[in-house]
Amino acid sequence: MKLSESDLQRLKSILMKLKTDLLIAGETGQQAEEVVELDQARVGRLSRMDAMQAQAMSQETGRRRRQHIVEIDAALDRIRAGDYGDCFECGEFIHPGRLTADPAATLCIGCAEALE
Ligand SMILES: [Zn+2]
């Protein structure tokens, strides 16, 4: 099922919105990732472990967020290039419903399930 021009425009605006949200979330997340180093000298051992755990979590969140932005940019590039919506594995069209749920998807549902 090939995507119509209006589908493409709609998915493109979803991608741009997602990217903006991630960039905004990134600004607050960045601070959480840096917290431990600043406080290290004056917090006790236990609370330091808590802080390090919290830092590790926000670093992981940050890593996923940056990865997601890369995927979104790649999807926007494919829209520009005109090969958006093709499955990376089998080359078939990815179902529009699946793209609406995850506009950065690179695999059709069949190939994605086969990988799991
Ligand atoms: Zn496929």
Image (cartoon, helix red, strand yellow):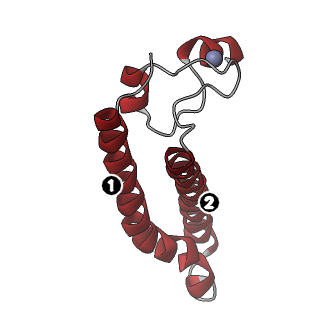
Percent of width and height locating residue 78: 56, 45
Which residue corresponds to the image point at 53% horizontal and 33% vertical from the top-left? 105
User: In this figure, which residue is indicated by the disc labeled 1?
Assistant: 17
Within 10 Å of disc 2 (Cα), the crowding (few <14, some 14-19, many 20+) is some
Which residue corresponds to the image point at 40% horizontal and 72% vertical from the top-left? 28
Answer with the quadrant where ligand 1 appears in the image.
Answer: top right
What's the residue type where badge 2 is placed?
Answer: Ala
Quarter-of-image position of residue 10? top left
Quarter-of-image position of residue 106? top right
| Quadrant into which the N terminus falls | top left
Percent of width and height locating residue 107: 60, 25
What element does badge 1 sit on?
helix
User: In this figure, which residue is indicated by the disc labeled 2?
Assistant: 56
What element does badge 2 sit on?
helix
From mark 1 to mark 2, how far is it between C-alphas? 27 Å
Which residue corresponds to the image point at 43% horizontal and 30% vertical from the top-left? 99
- Depth check, front residue: 75 or 61: 75
- Depth check, front residue: 83 or 34: 83
